[in-house]
Every structure is written in C-alpha cells, then in structure tokens.
C-alpha cells in the first residue's frame, strides 16, 4: 500500500475520533484502531514516514498515536 494511502486512511481515522472532547482518549482510540485493523507493516511504514518527515501532512491525533510506545 502506498504511503499516501496510509496517510489518507490515518487522517480519516483521526478525523472520526477528533470529536472526542478528551484528547488523550482520542489519541488512544486512534492508536487502538490502528493496532486492531492495520498490519504491522502498515504501522511500521507510516511510523517510518512520520520520522522522516516530522509528521508532515498527518493529523495531530495520528502524530500523537504514532509516538505512543509499542505501536509498531
């Protein structure tokens, strides 16, 4: 899967959870969704891209979820 597709999907997930007033819960929800429904390769690819590009183009909730320990 292309990195562009992963970014688009991750941002869609984040936009869904962005209405949660508790930001920490929203970050955990994004993280949980990615752990539950994404393959390890997808998570690794997006995490590597985030490190290379300092999170450019990623929703802040995705950036926070990717920095949580043990996402990969």
Image (cartoon, rainbow, N blue to C red):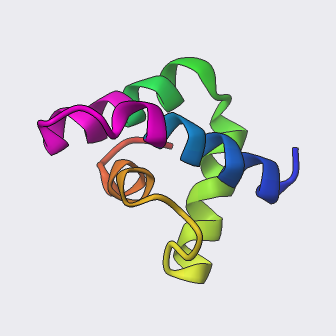
Count all numbered tags in the image, as a single digit. 0
Kindly identify the residue that appears in the image at 36 percent across and 51 percent down: 61
Is 70 in front, or is 6?
A: 6
Q: Position of residue 43 (x, y in %)?
A: 60, 44
Q: Is residue 25 magenta?
A: yes
Residue 29, quarter of picture: top left
Vertical side of 68 occupied by 41: above or below: above
Q: Is residue 20 magenta?
A: yes
Left or right side of 18 for 57: right
Say whether residue 41 is left or right of residue 35.
right
Query: Residue 26 occupies which quadrant of the picture?
Result: top left
Residue at screen point 23% across, 32% down: 20
Q: Main secondary structure of the magenta part?
A: helix
Which residue is the extreme one toward the right?
A: 1
Question: Where's the N terminus, which quadrant?
Answer: top right
Can you name the residue that lies furthest to the front here? 19
Foreground residue, 4 or 15? 15
On the image, the x and y values in percent for residue 21 come to: 14, 36
The magenta-colored residue range is 15-29
């Amino acid at each position: 899967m292309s990195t562009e597709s992963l970014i688009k999907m991750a941002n869609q997930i984040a936009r869904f959870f962005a209405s949660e007033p508790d930001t920490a819960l929203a970050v955990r929800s994004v993280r949980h969704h990615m752990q539950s429904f994404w393959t390890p390769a997808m998570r690794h690819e997006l995490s590597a891209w985030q490190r290379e590009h300092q999170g450019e183009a990623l929703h802040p909730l995705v950036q926070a979820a990717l920095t949580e320990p043990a996402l990969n």
